[in-house]
Amino acid sequence: FFSYCSAMADYEVSDAEIVQIANSFLLASPPGEFMEVVTDVRGLLPDDSLINDSAPATFREWNTDQMLQVKSPKGNHEVLISKYGEVNDAEYLDPRGNCVVQYDHIRQEVVGSRGIEGELDKSVEDYRSAFDDAAQDYLAEHYINGGCTVYGAKKGGQTNITVCISSSKFNPNNFWNGRWRSVWECTFSGNGSITLKGNLKLQVHYYEDGNVQLNSNTNKSGNANGGDAKTAAANALKQIKRIEAEFQAALDHSYNIMGDTTFKALRRTLPITKKKMEWDMRRIKALRMASTR
């Protein structure tokens, strides 16, 4: 962005292009740092009012993509602000709380709620509720900082349950923030089995004396046995737990070997002595004289 700003002195850049570039930086903001990036981007713009018109859409895009966790106004649980439960630009389903949450994307806070008026598919509510209960148990065991919202609907005549999980941990005092997100589409087939299709995302930002980001985005799939609502939910969440645990174990393994592979390739190789070069000129001259004897 800094190089772009310096280039503006030599090239004519339209306001539309400036807004597009600014919004791309906002949408790439790390977890827990969105408002800080907004402030910094505004400070770099020739006129910070340029992004005012696009701000509502940009804020909404980032908030829903990150699946922000908010306290439900109708229960002692958290609900996710996600695209999967979006009723309109400012309203989001809270099936567990049996309400629609009204959300201000600019202020990033709940501003009200209303009762559900036909937004829930009652024909799959028994299964959705069972999946919700099983997902909450899984969340309490593995994502103590997380939130989960489960949606249900009929799609193409088949029961479809969507499990959304978002878990964040922010530690700005130690210069790092991170968020886990996973979305599982659970589709019941005619033979009673359940097809699982998941998207797993992990984003971590470490910025002490530098700027390092980990961004992982992968798709997974699996199958589970069906049954009544409670049995099907237990079977599906058992498979989700297994798949996510395997993925996280693979990440952990990658970190353990990264020092000898990826990071090693980025570092300058040490001399054959395996010691850092002493750049004192007197020392270098002494070594040169010794090598010519």
Image (cartoon, helix red, strand yellow):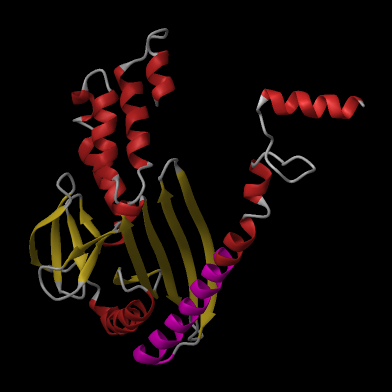
Q: Is residue 237 part of the magenta span, yes or no?
A: yes
Q: Is residue 273 left or right of residue 261?
A: right
Where on the picture, by quarter, is residue 57?
top left
Q: Which percent across, then down, holds residue 208? A: 40, 45
The residue depicted at 46 percent of the width and 47 percent of the height is 213
Q: Is residue 219 left or right of residue 5?
A: right
Where on the picture, by quarter, is residue 58?
top left
Looking at the image, residue 148 lies above or below residue 82: below
Farthest residue in the right direction?
293
Where is the C terminus found, in terms of image quarters? top right
Q: Which percent across, then down, holds residue 40? A: 27, 32
Q: Is residue 117 part of the magenta span, yes or no?
A: no
Looking at the image, residue 217 lies above or below residue 240: above
Closest to the observer: 104 or 147? 147
Looking at the image, residue 11 lies above or below residue 262: above
Q: How many marks?
A: 0
Q: Which percent across, then down, holds residue 31? A: 33, 51
Q: Which percent across, then down, holds residue 52? A: 19, 30
Closest to the observer: 233 or 275? 275
The residue depicted at 44 percent of the width and 82 percent of the height is 236
| Magenta residues (range) | 227-251
The residue depicted at 33 percent of the width and 61 percent of the height is 169
The residue depicted at 31 percent of the width and 57 percent of the height is 170
Where on the picture, by quarter, is residue 277?
top right
Which secondary structure type mostly characterizes the magenta part of the structure?
helix
